[in-house]
Image (cartoon, helix red, strand yellow):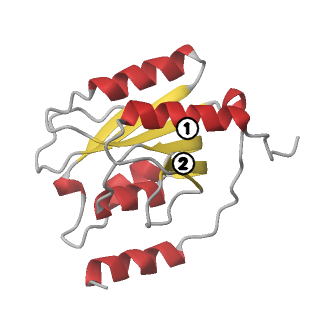
């Protein structure tokens, strides 16, 4: 194991354990979409997914990572793209990014990253969410994982996630 993963695992162990709350799609109100940004930072497929969720009365926050030094997109309350400068040379996020990630709590984190980098793993780890879902990985930050071939698009992954969430019976206590 390299030093970057060792530090990541130590930080992960030190975080307080969280209670996972499974909710049906209709009960979910706040969603964080974690994705790998294209280098132009436009991400039309992500925008379409966000619009779909907003049409379904979901409050969506977009959180992306672009593997480049300079990010040109502004930091907005509902959208943020992090870049290389937001992380140390060991891969963990700086204090400002960590604060931004932990500022809000979500009902659901949808991880749409396909080949999760260490930076994206940290982002998934630090985002506060009752339920974290996404493509199956060996990383272990997610509570609910869907097995899909890597050639499937983010939109297809999103469709599968929504399909499964509509089948879930909530374990929330009323």
Provide the residue designation for mark 2: 133
Graded by Cα atoms within 10 Å as few (under 14), some (14 to 19) or many (20 or more), the crowding at tag 1 reads some
Residue 24 seen in render: no
Q: Looking at the image, which residue is at 26% across and 29% down?
A: 43
Provide the residue designation for mark 1: 161
Residue 129 seen in render: yes
Q: Looking at the image, which residue is at 60% across and 70% down?
A: 16
Q: Secondary structure at mark 2?
A: strand
- Pick the residue in front: 122 or 154: 154
**Are discs 1 and 2 less than 8 Å apart at CB?**
yes
Which corner quadrant holds the C terminus?
top right
**Front tag of 1 and 2:** 1
Q: Secondary structure at mark 1?
A: helix
Residue 73, quarter of picture: top left
Residue 35, quarter of picture: top left
Residue 59, quarter of picture: top right
Question: Is 130 situated left or right of 133 in this image?
Answer: right
Question: Is 68 situated left or right of 17 in this image?
Answer: left
Residue 12 position within the rendered picture, expressed as x and y whole percent measured from the top left? 48, 73
- Pick the residue in front: 136 or 58: 136
Residue 149 position within the rendered picture, expressed as x and y whole percent measured from the top left? 39, 47
């Amino acid at each position: 194991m390299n030093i970057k993963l060792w530090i990541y695992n130590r930080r992960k162990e030190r975080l307080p354990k969280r209670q996972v709350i499974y909710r049906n799609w209709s009960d979910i109100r706040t969603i964080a979409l974690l994705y790998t940004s294209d280098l132009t930072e436009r991400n039309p497929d992500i925008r379409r997914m966000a619009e779909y969720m907003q049409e379904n009365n979901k409050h969506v926050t977009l959180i992306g990572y672009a593997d480049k030094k300079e990010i040109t997109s502004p930091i907005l309350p509902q959208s943020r793209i992090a870049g290389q400068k937001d992380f140390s040379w060991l891969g963990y996020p700086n204090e400002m990014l960590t604060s931004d990630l932990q500022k809000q709590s979500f009902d659901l984190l949808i991880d749409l990253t396909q080949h999760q980098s260490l930076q994206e793993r940290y982002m998934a780890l630090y985002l506060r969410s009752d339920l974290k879902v996404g493509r199956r990985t060996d990383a272990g930050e997610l509570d609910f994982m869907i097995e899909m071939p890597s050639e499937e698009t983010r939109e297809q992954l999103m469709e599968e996630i929504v399909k499964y969430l509509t089948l879930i019976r909530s374990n929330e206590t009323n």
